[in-house]
Amino acid sequence: MTINTLTKGGAQREQMYCLRKMERVIVAMQDPDMGMKMRNQRLLITVIPHAMTGNDVIEWLIQKYNITEEEARHLGGLLVQYGYIYPLREPRSLLLRSDDSPYRFQTPYFWTSSRWPATELDYAIYLAKKNIRKQGELVDYEKENYSILHKRINHTWDFVVMQAREQLRASKQRRKADRIVLECQEQAYWLINKPCPGAFDVLDLGPERCNVLSSRVALNADHYRREIEHSRRALGRNRVKSSICLESFMKYSEQYLHHDPIMSGCLPSNPWISDDTSHWTINTDMVGIPTRLRVERWSFSFMELLNDSMGRREFMIYLEKEFSAENLCFWVACEDLRHGESSKIILKVEEVYKNFLAPGAARWVNIDSKTMERTLEGIKRPHRFIMDDAQMHIYFLMKKDSYPRYLKSELYKNMLAKAIVPQETKKSVFPFMRRQRHSSPSPAMVTQATEDDGKAKGAGPTGTSSTTNSQI
Amino acid sequence: MNSPPHFICTPFSLMACQGLASGETLKSLKAESETLRKKLEEERKKLHDVELEKVAEKAEALGELNMKTRRTLKGHGNKVLCMDWCKDKRRIVSSSQDGKVIVWDAFTTNKEHAVTMPTTWVMACAYAPSGCAIACGGLDNKCSVYPLSLDKDENLAAKKKSVAMHTNYLSGCTFTNSDMQILTSSGDGTSALWDVESGQLLQSFHGHSADVLTLDLAPSETGNTFVSGGSDKKANVWDLRSGQNVQSFDTHDSDINCVKYYPSGDAFASASDDSTCRLFDLRADREVSIYSKDSIMFGAASVDFSLSGRLLFAGYNDYTINVWDVLKGTRVAILFGHENRVSSLRVSPDGTAFCSGSWDNTLRVRQEGRGVGRELKQGGTTLYG
């Protein structure tokens, strides 16, 4: 049983969106001009009017939405799964077959959106009918549900049986074709609303979500005041012209095109395809010689350089030559403060002050006087973000000054020159011979090892062959 | 006192009304808010001088995408609700409806760790940047951190640390730049930043008027913002330091299930129950593209960008994954294979593949065989030479 067949609020609203869209498709399919051609379909010896074949449905969808057959089959399959179209042959199997199997449109009375959630009373009547009509027609889970309902709504049971008998009597008086259709319609509805436990439940929605009307957040004066304040601030904000913003997306995707493995492949090969982890091994933090793509990427932005531990190392070497390494050290220390444990904040702030800000400090950083004043004042009541202003000042200093010079330096140029460009691995002649997939040491283990050693001695590169696969 | 028709005057609401200044009523506040919002819309329109489609005309068209499933991770006994990659580019953590959280080496498909949470519907899970811990939570309203032990016999649950406490279900969680802080989103309408070590609440973010369903941390230089999406159809950008809502977008017609930043941090994409995905530019302060198709009728549950931001992968409630050309706005491919909703989708940290988790209890890692931009290659290695 689903978790929330009881609540009519958010969950139903969510379902409504796709249900309404499906219903629009169904209506379009039945349009006299643009809809499907329906005809009589033969079911054993009975002729059922206004039916179509599975093929018809798929063809129509292909035409209407200009999609492939695979997508049309999938879409058509969903229409059947949600009960908008039901099969006449093998009615218990809600699948769309792409052949001449006959199907019919579900009557709007039984649309998933009209009668949801299904009522216990209706279900009881349905099961009673089945039971009376043919002994043993009820499947196991239906028998169970039947007896549960019998206990639960025992007080109305006479009514249930009476209704069931009445409906059966009425149906006996119908033509065979109509009777079959009505039975199929009803059965399809119940297959969806009360599926066999363990079977696919199309109406399973997950935990309930609320919406603004039944909101858990109070829509009071404070809420609107906050919104007003927010709008006022937003009105005063600087915006950039669309043409400039959108142009930047173009530039970005072009710049990173060759770095995007899905767009351009990767060298020597994509590990997920070739089962060869070389691509990862040649790009580890501790590798001796980096790849050309990697070094090129450092030139894309200052962030790229700093985000790569090797890039950061190289930049540090450069700064040391320029006698401005304290800037990067300061930045790293501030990052550590910002993202570290709360309990160490006071200690770290003291360290930073001692090493970088105090007069005569060993690695004094050159911050403008206003920022310095503000920071020193703030240190009296240290918190996680106290160094933000100073950190940003130094960051932009490096970005505008040292970084561009680094990119023009011999150090960087040499790095770029000796960077490797791996050979593309040709696809093997025998593609069915799969390479053995080697496991790699867990990051947790690598860290533990370095902690144990005390010093990181080029901690084991990932992808070394250790074929002892761990299994749980 | 005039109250709007839908507002029920319970004692609590009367107290709220008492906070009004003279001349103010709840109705007038609401009206003022509406007026300002309309004005904001007009302001935003003024700088919109070109559509993304037009700008993208000069971009090269993409070739045919040929993505195949390279790994299928089977092992969950129930719906997979969430997944996250490890920074090592091959490990994955996934969580499911029955409370199981599994850490896989997706490359070998081996399961390395498994934890059973004391709750069902574990809707959020995240891998720590160091690779040494995972965080997860769901209907228990909490976010817990499990250090990953290498001792096979050790019970992971023993070392569990309760970090976040909300008053409703946990919908999303992510570590910030280190293992020490976690950002969470909840069905109680708030997001929050927590200190892992102490479990202390560092900052909370109020502003959504319904469940917050998703969040993503900005990759920007100053690393100070994140975006969240909710059942109130809004996507909000927040300042981590001050807790303030700095930007808001409300063009979706239904719940926003997932938000993801564009790699440069200047924009973000959203996936919604209204069956569309949209791109919002933060500097232009507006929605700049919609990714939708008539034949797509079901809600989009999850999105992620390829490394260059040219492709947007989106998982839907109709079991498919649609791949969009972010710039041109067209659909590049539709991928089948899952037999139930795609609940979660992430591109690997180095962009070599992407993984999707589904309500069909499996996870699939997919990759493109030849490189979809191959039209642009002049052949093999010559471009790099």
Image (cartoon, coloured by chain):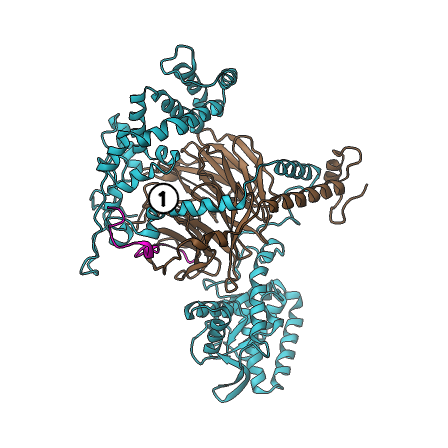
Chain colours: A cyan, B brown
Instruction: Name the image quarter holding the N terminus of chain B.
Output: top right
Q: Residue at x 34, y 28 (%)?
A: A405
Residue A111 image position (x, y, % from top left): 59, 69
Left or right of A400: which side holds A283?
A: left
Q: Is residue B72 visible?
A: no
**Residue at the extreme left:** A429
**Callout 1 amino acid:** Pro
Magenta residues span B360-385
Nearest the camera: A72 or A191?
A72
Residue A329 image position (x, y, % from top left): 36, 23
Magenta stretch: helix, strand or loop mostly: loop
Q: Residue at x 59, y 60 (%)?
A: A16
Q: Residue at x 36, y 32 (%)?
A: A306
Q: How many marks?
A: 1
Nearest the camera: B144 or B212?
B212
Which chain is mark 1 on?
A: B
**Residue at the extreme bottom:** A45
Q: In the rendered image of this protein, does residue A391 appear above or below residue B53?
A: above
Q: In the rendered image of this protein, does residue A405 appear above or below residue A137?
A: above
Q: In the rendered image of this protein, does residue B226 appear above or below residue A350?
A: below
Left or right of A135: which side holds A163?
A: right
Question: Which secondary structure, mark 1?
Answer: loop
Q: Which residue is mark 1?
A: B349
Q: In the rendered image of this protein, does residue A378 appear above or below residue B98?
A: above
Residue B335 among those drawn in magenta? no
**Residue at the extreme right:** B1
Left or right of B269: which side holds A413?
A: left
Residue B257 image position (x, y, % from top left): 52, 50
Q: Is residue A133 visible?
A: yes
